[in-house]
Amino acid sequence: MAGSTLGTVFQLATWGESHGAGVGVVVDGCPAGVELREEIVQRYLNRRKPGQTRYSTPRKEEDAVEILSGVFEGKTTGTPISMVVYNKTQRSGDYSQIAESYRPGHADYTFDQKYGFRDYRGGGRSSGRETIGRVAAGAIAAEILKSLGIQVCAYTKEIGGIAADPSRSHLENVKESPLYMPDLAASQEAELLLEQKMKEQDSVGGVIECIVKGMPAGVGEPVFDRLDANLARAVMSIGAIKGVEIGDGFEAARSFGSQNNDSFQTDSSGRVTKKTNHAGGILGGISDGSDIVIRAAVKPTPSISRSQQTVSRNGENIEIQVRGRHDPIIVPRAVVVVEAMTAITLLDMLMISMTSRLEYLQSFVHARKPLS
Amino acid sequence: MAGSTLGTVFQLATWGESHGAGVGVVVDGCPAGVELREEIVQRYLNRRKPGQTRYSTPRKEEDAVEILSGVFEGKTTGTPISMVVYNKTQRSGDYSQIAESYRPGHADYTFDQKYGFRDYRGGGRSSGRETIGRVAAGAIAAEILKSLGIQVCAYTKEIGGIAADPSRSHLENVKESPLYMPDLAASQEAELLLEQKMKEQDSVGGVIECIVKGMPAGVGEPVFDRLDANLARAVMSIGAIKGVEIGDGFEAARSFGSQNNDSFQTDSSGRVTKKTNHAGGILGGISDGSDIVIRAAVKPTPSISRSQQTVSRNGENIEIQVRGRHDPIIVPRAVVVVEAMTAITLLDMLMISMTSRLEYLQSFVHARKPLS
Amino acid sequence: MAGSTLGTVFQLATWGESHGAGVGVVVDGCPAGVELREEIVQRYLNRRKPGQTRYSTPRKEEDAVEILSGVFEGKTTGTPISMVVYNKTQRSGDYSQIAESYRPGHADYTFDQKYGFRDYRGGGRSSGRETIGRVAAGAIAAEILKSLGIQVCAYTKEIGGIAADPSRSHLENVKESPLYMPDLAASQEAELLLEQKMKEQDSVGGVIECIVKGMPAGVGEPVFDRLDANLARAVMSIGAIKGVEIGDGFEAARSFGSQNNDSFQTDSSGRVTKKTNHAGGILGGISDGSDIVIRAAVKPTPSISRSQQTVSRNGENIEIQVRGRHDPIIVPRAVVVVEAMTAITLLDMLMISMTSRLEYLQSFVHARKPLS
Amino acid sequence: MAGSTLGTVFQLATWGESHGAGVGVVVDGCPAGVELREEIVQRYLNRRKPGQTRYSTPRKEEDAVEILSGVFEGKTTGTPISMVVYNKTQRSGDYSQIAESYRPGHADYTFDQKYGFRDYRGGGRSSGRETIGRVAAGAIAAEILKSLGIQVCAYTKEIGGIAADPSRSHLENVKESPLYMPDLAASQEAELLLEQKMKEQDSVGGVIECIVKGMPAGVGEPVFDRLDANLARAVMSIGAIKGVEIGDGFEAARSFGSQNNDSFQTDSSGRVTKKTNHAGGILGGISDGSDIVIRAAVKPTPSISRSQQTVSRNGENIEIQVRGRHDPIIVPRAVVVVEAMTAITLLDMLMISMTSRLEYLQSFVHARKPLS
């Protein structure tokens, strides 16, 4: 299937392999009139660039985005926006190891099972570079949401079991931490763990949290297109993600109704709010106007230089040390990807929710009529 | 949007409110030639019926399914299968409480925000009865998978923090336990907790696990339609689910690469298998031939008779005791719903994977040609 | 595939066979707040009922629609609307003829080729009764459009080559004509032709025209979801339709640019209009504010009692006289179906066009904000 | 909406404006294992290139395609195929005329109405260059179909009312005719008409016919995804197309049942065929194994240098002579576009039809099983 296409109204199709000509995305259904320049998208892409700290691969990827269509005089025209990042650092390289054997924790085996063969250069389509298209599209979605007063912000909640302590966590800390953690003490502790695991030729996982502020109530469709369901899908579709939670998530399963229910209240200004937010801003699949809270579990980088047992393409039991220099942890670079997938999903569902009442249609048509 | 429609090739549209004429589903895209009778679907529906143990509401719902189309002489014809369960126990009842106030933990507020008003009788479309259509469609999907040698089996993994101990867990126990737990000792402990919480007019949450055996490798699409992503969406779309895990899930985030990677090996029969299954049967979004493992966090039933603070429809701060007799726990009745959503997703993606190689197309057309 | 499901935002799934339990439709994505009662839908269904003139089959079908969900206190709730018409006149009948041979011009052969077998009772899913679900959904779409000032009106343009003369055509005549023609002289001439062809045990085809008035400019998406493209698909999906035209259609192909281009002009009130409407109200796939004009070619009823050559299911060359009493012409009963498919398509695309500009999103969110 | 995305399993998203950086397409869902090189796609693109005869614009467009992803060692990998044609001949040019006024017969006015403004350079997204992405994707679809024994072939049937005479028409003639007509005498006559109309600063329309040979029976879904319905949509979505016919099309509407029904017969080899093919190879929306026949009406080029009345962007009534050198006829260059849209639709529906029977699924899974 068209597994690289996502969305109903705000729709994207990503393409590209790690060591092909480039990677990119076509964003279809973006509203007209959005200010867009390459620098805006680049700012988001830079956050996933490798080589920025010693916890990401020292490969230098320039990842300079070019916008090929859909923008005229600095504004989106409503037609498809094609964005591309050419692969500048692709090397002819020696890929015989990946070509001939199945790296544990990677998609080598499953791609071969599915397609009969695969582009083995640097992981091909299952490479982390696949997320460039997501982040470029997510940049547009996040900018649109921002212009609507909706802020999407992700950060590292936990690394190797070391969690940010809510009492010490501040969003301003995130950019101070090389691991994008809001708790700088936890960040330093996590750095020590990473140093140790790098020495042991091992890798570390973690948890990313994403908070959405300013989301209006009433977005999301009951039943299959619940906001939480579509967020779960979007976030789980990122490579290496093994779990997704909304609000209290698995803790809610260990809680009782009297604790877990969020009481409604009317504040002094007459606005309905909730006293707590165990639900993570979504009730019955529809946003309730509180902060939306999502968490994603990221597995440890599967590429480790330690020796591992596996099989070769022709079925022999072999040992493998995965060559090359890899990130000892995926989490920090995946933070902006979680943010992107969240923004893309929220925008699509927000646009869909414009059609939920006859009165919205009526005021739209009424406003349109005099034009013709 | 059409939020009650799901699937690409095997597609379903559910409909119906708690206290309307009935609830149902249209299954479109079901292959021709599947044996189907009402009794087969009924067997699945009976597993979500209330009133079977003292931990579910004593409301008697007959939930007798009728198949209205798509089946001829006991076999599916390839055309849409319409199934309906008429609401027999609907009562005129007094809904003024739900109509005029927002129950904490329910979708009352968000429906009003989205649509401007709502069918408040018994929760309307956000009632648990909405899942009847899912289970009826899931029954068909599960039967098709079974005929292909693929078994989907869900059970209660954990209740109120009391988890089934793997060493004492056996699938045969599931039907012995009134809570559908595979560990009978844990089940008894959980029953005691439930008794206590019922006395306290409170409710309990839990975790459902679903295991898929016999899944061929190569199913799932890289990028957005990953098997894990679509499973996450399908399961998270069930009311009351707040988290989804694949394989080790959030534990993977606390693990290291050397532990979390599953080694491949060739067994004596020449078959490639994995020594462990931390990945839960999915690598790069594609099934790897191992068991698929999914877990879902279920929040405690939001309807509790204990007094809670909330607001009325016109914004007054009020106290509410949710009337009526409700399940103190959703988990046991949701087990078959998780199974249904898993089966529906697997079948849809299995069918799509038939198109992944030119050679499959060629043998299909070659086989078809002589017919015309 | 889910070939019985249509639409992106306003979506429908139809189901049902000619001689099964019933036929129906689930409409998902209908906005909340639309006044809806069974009588409103029934009024549209009555227009496709057989037995109203001597040019339609004397079978009495009551076709009484029931609304099973999605409506509360006389208004749509925004949740799926399930509508059903039970088959009251189904007869056990003798279907051995259809079961064992392939009627020329029917789908018997292709269903067998596709599915391996078919529900042969009265044509099964390929029966004209399949259109009941379309008309029921179309009734809702047409009523919504009407409330927005958009009128969709179809009629018979031509029968057996006898065309309504524009100079004698008036929409008021349509209900006077048993063939739904706007030109009563042509209608009488066509009746004579029909009488003659009935005597000859033959059948007649014709052309249906549909006019849409009040359509705002700016609806339709460039490229694949052009308004004309989606209208063509929707109308061509009706059984027996073999051609679709927009505006001048095939005549445009015989015209020259200087004749075919419609000049724009500003009228005295400052409104931009076109002097002519060869384009049929659509330019570049987007409505231009003029009347939308669509025409559909309807083939003659394939069921004729005259002897025809064909093959049996096991491949023998045989002669067949199709038994039963059938409409000598499909056209008059298909008029409301063309209207329904047009209304469904226009509404879906109108709703989608609400998302085409950032300013629309901004005013929507701005209006929503204070609610939460 | 995502109006530049098409298809369910074989899916494409096109992008690009006439005078932007380039135009292109992402093909998602292409099966793995298809031989693909740029030369193959280029061959199709060359057929729509301008400047090949004096009846197309003398603008030189090189239109050299680059494949950026999805192909490895000469074969498709099953992942998205991104193809781009950079705009080499874009000129800063003087677009004030298009920017400030609405050309009759063009989408200038409707784009402004829809989006509030438009990229006016050379027509922007509504330029004929938009079809490059379609043809590139169509090349892949056509090559796959060819490898399955299915040939898609389009040609010019009629120009300015001058029709190819079936008795003189041969497919071999098509490449001899500068207008791609199968009847060389008609082609010469049409050339004379074109010469005259060019002198008169006018333009001419025509009809394109497309024949599909070797299509297996059983492809297409009853109801909304009928093969004819999806073909109609795909072909009508090409700019300038105003009508679509299947088989006898509008002639069927003037025919009688006894003439229009195609008799089935079993030939000496035991194969079921039809004696005639008025239906154009499709019955009940499903292919019947005969040739599929589609015709499309193409309007005359709207750009003519003759003076026309129109309005300016600020509503003044003005006269316009559309500057620049334009094709006096669109038809010959659109032939390959019709072929492309037909191939894309047939392949998508052929792939979907692989899922129509349980037995197909069973043999697929059975064949897959031993691999894991």
Image (cartoon, coloured by chain):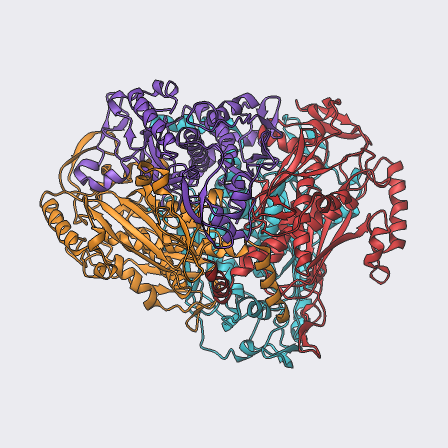
Chain colours: A orange, B purple, C red, D cyan
Q: Nearer the viewer, residue D333 or A310?
A: A310
Q: Nearer the viewer, residue D265 or A14?
A: A14
Quadrant of residue A243 within the rendered picture: top left
**Residue at figure coordinates x 65%, y 72% from the top left:** D198
Q: Disc count in the image?
A: 0
Q: Nearer the viewer, residue D290 or C328?
A: C328
Image coords of residue B331 (percent x, y): 39, 31
Image coords of residue D325 (percent x, y): 56, 74
Quadrant of residue C14 within the rendered picture: top right
Quadrant of residue D29 within the rendered picture: top left
In the shown orientation, is residue D268 left or right of residue B142?
right
**Residue D290 in view of the camera:** yes
Image coords of residue B282 (percent x, y): 32, 36
C55 w.r.t. C309: above or below: below
Image coords of residue A213 (percent x, y): 36, 58
**Residue A92 in view of the camera:** no
D213 w.r.t. D298: above or below: above
In the shown orientation, is residue A368 left or right of residue C45?
left
D194 w.r.t. D100: above or below: above
In the shown orientation, is residue A64 left or right of residue C246?
left
Q: Nearer the viewer, residue D313 or B332?
A: B332
C113 w.r.t. A289: above or below: above
